[in-house]
Amino acid sequence: MSARAIELHGPWGHVFGPLDLDIDIGGVTVLAAPAGAARTALLMALCGRMRLTAGSLTVLGFEDKPMAVFRNSTIACLNELDEVRPSVTVRDLVTEQLRWDSPWYRFVPRVGTSGVEDMCGEVFGDVPLPPLNAFVDDLPEIQQLLLRIAVANTRRPPLLVVGRIDKIADDEERLMVLERLVALGQTQSVITADVNPLPPGSSVRAVVDLHQLLNAGDIGVMTEAR
């Protein structure tokens, strides 16, 4: 990934930029930046979910082609895109994703425990899988986060973008999530963001410090710019 002088402006003004950014393929890259609209918009732009106002962005070999990047990437754990309703169970969420992934003519029954294991096992690793009939909103934070990643990542595209890992207050659990992302980074390029210093012992490939370039107080989510 290579970004040169990229900027985003919305109907209410400046969101971020101009900024330059280089990210190598593979492993986990953490964007160190304050939480807020600017960081959210940047993550969305890097995976083709938001069009830039200015500058040049090359991702996975596609230069200034957000739709091509969109087709070769996925994003998880951004409430603006994948927030889960409180009344949804683990079974419902996994079943719905399987139905989205299947051809329109194929009947997909409600999943059982094995269906949850098939979709979530690689992402969860040694973290216990969530109960089949539990409401997603009642799960521990780490299980909620990993479940949203697993559901978003069923296609295993080359680029996986994950937001909001700094929502986990417990450093040990945050390290566990990073370790799971590192495991996924063996076959994908993973980009995430965190306002906190990385816990000791994390195996992320690179940290890009954007604290001086992204302002958490910048304009709110630019729906018109998507």
Image (cartoon, grey):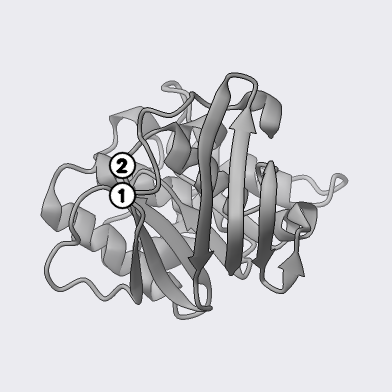
Number of numbered markers: 2
In the image shown, does 161 or 172 lie closer to the viewer?
161
Q: Where 156 sits versus 9, above or below?
A: below
Quadrant that contains the C terminus: top right
Residue 98 position, x and y percent, is 65, 49
Q: How far apart, in angstroms, are the residues tagged by discs 2 and 1?
A: 6 Å
Q: In the rendered image, is residue 85 in sight? A: yes
SS at circle 2: loop
Q: Residue at x 75, y 66 (%)?
A: 63
Dot 1: few (<14), some (14–19), or many (≥20) neighbours within 10 Å?
some
Circle 2/circle 1 CB separation < 8 Å: yes
Quadrant that contains the N terminus: bottom right
- According to the picture, the residue beneath numbered tag 1 turns out to be 211
Residue 192 position, x and y percent, is 41, 56
Between circles 2 and 1, the one closer to the viewer is 1
- N-terminal of the pair, mark 2 or mark 1, is 2
Residue 56 is left or right of residue 217, and the answer is right
Q: Residue furthest right?
A: 105
Amino acid type, residue under disc 2 in the picture: Pro
SS at circle 1: loop
Give the quarter of the image for residue 173. Answer: bottom left
Q: Where 98 sits versus 135, above or below?
A: below
Residue 110 position, x and y percent, is 60, 41
Q: Which disc number belongs to residue 34?
A: 2
Q: Residue at x 51, y 71 (%)?
A: 189
Q: Residue at x 47, y 66 (%)?
A: 190
Q: Residue at x 78, y 58 (%)?
A: 65
Dot 2: few (<14), some (14–19), or many (≥20) neighbours within 10 Å?
many
In the image shown, does 58 or 162 lie closer to the viewer?
58
Residue 90 is left or right of residue 173, and the answer is right
